[in-house]
Amino acid sequence: MDSWRFAWPRAKEFSFFSHVHKVYSRIDFFVLSRALIPKVAGTEYSAITVSDHAPHWVVLEMGKQRGQRPLWQMDVGLLADKEVCGQVWGCIQRYVEANDNGEVRVGTVWEALKAVVRGE
């Protein structure tokens, strides 16, 4: 289902300008499942500026799903425990030795490292 059309059933908005044909059309859109349509909190086309397409965005308010685990957050009190700090440091050293080979972007190595430490 077209999220913008659902939110604005009678409005006219265009996302593309054809320089060849000198016409506007709406060819850029988000198609969502019917289950996601009620979660649309906003949808809009911005002005056509840099390219011949207008930026289009959709905001979904997902909320907390039933049975969903809360986001992981480190207990900073663990940093006062020297044994825990030693375990984390050892985990980091092993991970870096095995994975930081210069072929993978530093950001990717960092994100994966955080996942590994969380799993320890």
Image: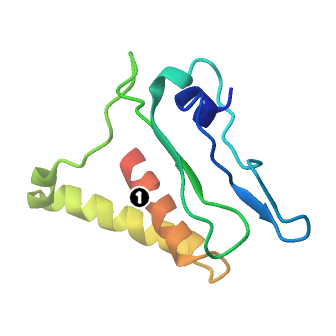
- The correct choice, above or below, for 51 with respect to 45 in the image is below
In the image, taking residue 6 as reference, residue 20 lies left or right, namely right
In the image, taking residue 73 as reference, residue 111 lies left or right, namely right
Residue ID at (62%, 80%): 101
In the image, taking residue 51 as reference, residue 10 lies left or right, namely left
Mark yes or no: residue 6 visible. yes
In the image, taking residue 84 as reference, residue 71 lies left or right, namely right
Residue extending farthest to the right is 20
- Comparing 44 with 61, the one in front is 44
> Pointer 1: what residue?
114
Three-letter amino acid code at the position of disc 1:
Lys
Mark yes or no: residue 120 visible. no
- The correct choice, above or below, for 5 with respect to 81 in the image is above
The location of residue 81, given as percent across then percent down, is 11, 56
- The correct choice, above or below, for 58 with respect to 48 in the image is above
Which picture quadrant has residue 10? top right
